[in-house]
Structure formats: structure tokens, C-alpha cells
Image (spheres, rainbow, N blue to C red):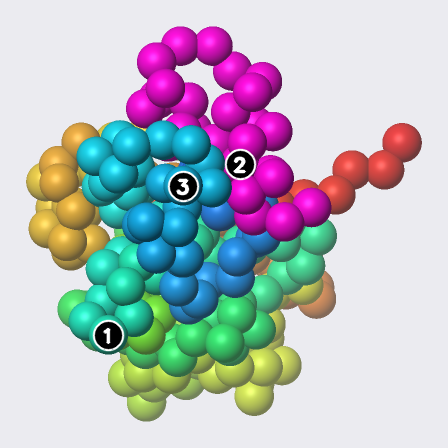
Amino acid sequence: MDFYAAVLERMGGQHGPLGERLRNALAAVLDSGTIAPGESLPSEREMAERLDVSRSTLRQGLKELAQLGLVATRPGAGTVVVGRIPKALSRLSGFSEDMHLRGLLPSSLVLECSIGPVGADAAFRTGLPLGTPVLTLVRLRLAGGEPIAYERAVVPVETVGADYDGSGSLYERMDARKARPRRVLQSLTATEASDEVAAQLNIRPGAAVLEISQLGYGETGTVVEDAISWYRGDRYKYVGEIRG
């Protein structure tokens, strides 16, 4: 099914004002990957004619899609599909690996990288003995220069080495020491961005973010990672397959 047929089908299955139906249909079709991220939408004139809507209605819909982070206007390219970055639930991977698979260039801004004894709360949560040397790493994660996630990770120093400065992939560093998590327990919560998180991700306070808390377990069953991350809700989605 082509782009226009898909949009018209979704519009026909809804009730309500035309502009709202158009926006919802465009969002659903773009989120499905009918037009790949990075590709341009057809011209406003063509879309308005093919979808039988006024250009003002179409412009308002595109404006709302831009506010949702699904499209962006770029000089010389028109309206470009941005899309959400999928994260597979069935595969254990780090941020850098996910971005490379998506064809995006990952980078990090290290906000804190310090070594100290594990605190009481973290020791209770992870089972690490009190006083275990741990590295606390706070980073802003970017894809193609765009802030995507704000994260705080605590790992035993022995899993990364005392000379690790937080740059590059954390999991690749752990791989080199055969300390990468082999099993991860995650908790996902849809929440609103705090002032701190919003400032780091360059979004408005109260915007939707996906808060992910995780404990990573090594080959021996001990915790090798205690992390919490906040991902932009307009740029990230989790995708899973369930078999019956």
C-alpha cells in the first residue's frame, strides 16, 4: 500500500474533525515506516490534492507532527521524516550499538565520571558489598548530534578499569574485560520530564519521556550495572515480539 492510500485508509477509520483525523493518520503512517527516516515528504500542494484537504489544514497537521518530533523542516529538503528510534526488547544491546544499526552516529557528553565506594541504597539494590569501589557515570547520549537520552550508570570499577573516562561505548569497554551484562532486568515507566532532564534533553519540562531502570547481571549472576535513563518519548520506542 502506498503512502496516500495508507493515510486515506486510516483517516476513513476515524471520527472527528478533519484536521485531527489527518494528523493522527499521518502520524500512524509515518511511525509505521512507510516513508523511511531521512526521506522527504511530497510537496504540500501534492499532498493536499491527493488527500483532498486544504493546504492550511495540511500545514497545521505538519506543524503538529513537527511538535511531536516526527518530521522536521530542513533547508533544501522540505519536510523530512524524523521518525522514532526503535529499541528491540528481544536483544541485549547498548545505546551505541542501537544507533549504529539505525545508521546514526552515536556520541556522548560526559557530565560526571567518578570513583567511590558504593552507597547504601545502591548496595541494597544490587547486592554489592558496602564499600565496593564503583564508577558513577552520568552522560548525555546523542544521535547525529541530537540529544536522545540522559543516563546515570553505576558499575563496579573492576568491570571497566579505573582508567575509564566515560568516552565511547560502556558495553564495549566491559566486553574487553569480559564483564558485559548477560542478563538485564528492566523497568519501563512513561513519565514527565523533570526540569533537570528537560534541560539536558532540550525539551520542555513535563514533556513525555521513557524512564528505564535496569540491573545488568554478569556471567556469575552478580550485578555489573545499575542504571537509570530518560529517553525522549518523541524519538524513541520499544519494539517487542511475543510468541504464543
Q: Which residue is mark 2?
A: 7
Residue occupying the point 62% across, 54% down: 88
For residue 90, above or below residue 8 = below
Residue occupying the point 44% across, 66% down: 39
Front in this rendered view, residue 84 or 160: 84
> Could you tell me residue 27's position as x and y percent?
43, 38
The mark that comes first in sequence, 3 or 1, is 3
Q: Which residue is mark 1?
A: 76
- Tag 1: amino acid: Gly
Q: Is residue 22 magenta?
A: yes
Question: Magenta residues, as a range?
Answer: 1-25
Q: Which residue is mark 3?
A: 49
- Tag 2: amino acid: Val
From the viewer's perspective, is the residue at label 3 or at label 1 nearer? Answer: 3
For residue 46, above or below residue 195 = below
> Could you tell me residue 56's position as x and y percent?
21, 34
- Tag 3: amino acid: Glu
Mark-to-mark CA distance, 3 and 2 = 13 Å
> Could you tell me residue 137's position as x and y percent?
29, 67
